[in-house]
Amino acid sequence: MKQRITFIGAGNLATHLALELKNAGYEILQVYSRTIESATMLAGKLDAEAIQTTKLISPNADIFIVALKDSALDDVLSGIDFQNSIVLHCSGSLPLSVLHKYSNNTGVLYPLQTFSKGRKVDFRKIPVFVEASNHKTEDLLFELAKNISPNVSLYNSGKRKSLHIAAVFACNFVNHFYTLADDFLQQKEIPFEVLRPLIEETAQKVQEINPARAQTGPAVRFDENIINDHLHQLNNFPEHQKLYKSISKSIFEHHQKKNK
């Protein structure tokens, strides 16, 4: 019999994970959020109870999945009596130990993916990293994770934090560069859509070859004529200009080291 689950949090990750677990046959009992609108929206998709106060959290759940921003975790959990049920968080940067004061049975369920509420993702393609405070909880957590993804690995807090840092570079920073490119193109009355084939090919290429080998552009060879011309064109975009210069220098120096 699959465990009953309560979600503490109703954001992007909680939404995707809760729906995936429901589809895998798990019963979602409650969804807590500080805003009742968010809790109600998600709970309605799960046939679960929406709650806005931690005092209403039922002890009947077998597993509590905490999907909150890191800074809010202690503030929210401190008022809950988990009665030694399993308590999991989904953070890449927080250690498992932050949960030890709440239960003897704790764990981490960390799907390495970017989530937005309006966009579907295929969990079968998402690597999931788990960690637990004891073998029994670890076994249960592996079983739960395997029900949503075939790619499950046991990673400790240190390795998971390294993964999170790498993910920030590979996803969050890259997306910020898309945003800056869009800002620049809007000023030039050029649609962002013209970049989409380039973005798609760049992402596809690193699926097949090493990222360092996939690197192209003027910074690799440090073509000063092109770089200086681009910097001049960015005079009215000082933040873009600063990043362009810094990243170009980083690309060139990285490839010089690789070629030594």
Image (cartoon, rainbow, N blue to C red):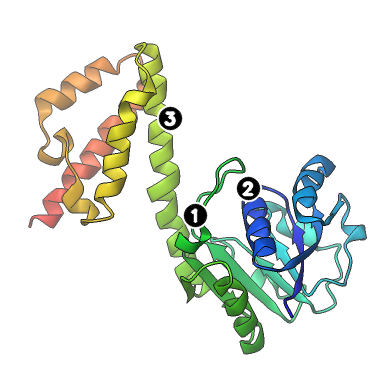
The reply, left or right, for residue 61 in relation to residue 208 is: right
Query: In percent of the image, x 17 and y 23: which residue is there?
Result: 228
* Callout 1 amino acid: Gln
Residue matched to label 1:
113
Q: Residue 26's mark?
A: none
Does residue 96 appear in the picture of this structure?
Answer: no
Residue matched to label 3:
179
The reply, left or right, for residue 205 in relation to residue 154 is: left
The vertical placement of 166 against 39, above or below, is below
The N terminus, quarter of image? bottom right
Observer-nearest of 151 and 54: 151
In the rendering, at what x and y percent does residue 8 appear? 76, 58
Marks 3 and 2, how far apart at CA = 20 Å
Residue matched to label 2:
12
Observer-nearest of 136 and 231: 136
The image quadrant of residue 94 is bottom right
Marks 3 and 1, how far apart at CA = 19 Å
Near mark 3 (Cα within 10 A), the count class, few <14, some 14-19 or many ≥20, is few
